[in-house]
Amino acid sequence: MNNSHIRFTRPAAFSSAVTIVAALTSQACADPLPAENPKTHLDEPVQPIAIQVDTTRSSEAPASSAPAVAEAPPPPTYKDVGLKTPESVLYEATSDVYLVSNINGAPPEKDNNGFISILAPDGSVKALKFIAGGENGVTLDAPKGMGISGDVLYVSDIQDVRKFDLKTGAPKGSIHIPKATFLNDIAVDAQGTVYVSDSGRKAGKEGLEPSGTDALYKLVGDKAVVVVKGKQLEGPNGVNVDADGIEFATMGGDSFVRINAAGKELARAHLPGGGLDGIVRLADGSYLVSSWQGQAVYRGGFTQPFVAVLKDAPSSADIGYDSKRDRILIPVLMQDLVRTVALPESDAPKAVANPAPKADELVSASPASSAPSAAPPKAK
């Protein structure tokens, strides 16, 4: 997520994004969701297109005996499908789907209209509202980061971490963190322990303003334990947990930081642009980090400089990664869409997923109608 109190000079494009975020904060989205008929089941598999091969032979130019090979379709963009202020995309490898958190309004607004969508890698929508605030006993205000531990989907939601059954979407309780003001990203370690960042933001006259609650929490049972806290964290946003420690990206600066389990800083890197958001770690040890100020996705690490691998990427929020297809999954928060972009072949090692225990199939397969198109995004 972005905010209007960032400690660096903003280019005009970044200031425009901040202005829109301020408008989003001042008034929650009053528009109702489109009148889709939400489904919570997977679509029937898409039938492959039959490839017509010309078997005509010319006496002057004999045809090659090599079989025809169909070109792979380009990575899809999910536009005008009903997404509303998408903040995070998580690749669920077991079911081979993308989970998308939709704020559907202002990021700090408790309006119980947030929802989680399921998208298929082929460009179709499996379920626009797999989980929806105000339906089936669900409370979901402004969902942001997501993580999977066992068969439970964890979702950050302002002051609460919501828990849902990964297969059915049924609510399984929540963990309230009263001292938090803007819970943001979630990461899960190899043992299934869940970590969540508090970016320390609140609604203000100019948009999102610092609240002073900046922190990183670890969930122990149904309690949140502080790993590190303080304004010096500069609004921790994206989080990654691995064998080397805990990394977070700063919303209020350009720092990418590694700490240990006790909260001690181990390493720090600075990116070309600030207003940092999502993190993905790749198999070679490098990282992908999205930047609101830079309007880019950078790749680098603590021992190598960060460079832009994707430019012209405004309002890119909490990115994900499809490790099967080497795609960056980009929620474009201000445009109500999700982009998927392939890294160049020479620059696309397989991503390292959080090695949490796998769950069964996410949703039982059965026919579902396509989601209707949504109206064009409106400034809030």
Image: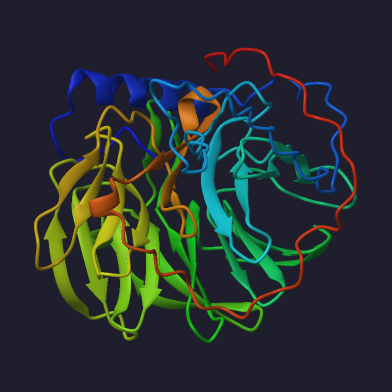
Q: What is the count of numbered marks? A: 0
Q: Position of residue 22 (x, y in %)?
A: 42, 25
Any part of residue 248 in sight: yes
* Quarter of the image that includes the N terminus: top left
Q: Position of residue 326 (x, y in %)?
A: 41, 53
Along the viewing direction, whichever of 111 and 345 lies nearer the viewer: 345
User: Which image quadrant is residue 5 in?
Assistant: top left
- What residue sits 64% from the left and 27% below the top? 52
- What residue sits 57% from the left and 51% below the top? 158
* Quarter of the image that includes the C terminus: top right
User: Which image quadrant is residue 80 in?
Assistant: top right
On screen, residue 380 versus residue 154, left or right, reads: left
- What residue sits 48% from the left and 36% below the top? 71
Along the viewing direction, whichever of 86 and 363 lies nearer the viewer: 363
115 is higher (above) or lower (below) than 12:
below
Q: Position of residue 10 (x, y in %)?
A: 18, 28
On screen, residue 357 versus residue 257, left or right, reads: right
On screen, residue 248 versus residue 158, left or right, reads: left
Q: Position of residue 112 (x, y in %)?
A: 74, 41
27 is higher (above) or lower (below) than 317:
above
Along the viewing direction, whichever of 49 and 46 lies nearer the viewer: 49
331 is higher (above) or lower (below) than 319:
above
User: Which image quadrant is residue 204 in?
Assistant: top left
Any part of residue 107 in sight: no
- What residue sits 80% from the left and 29% below the top? 370
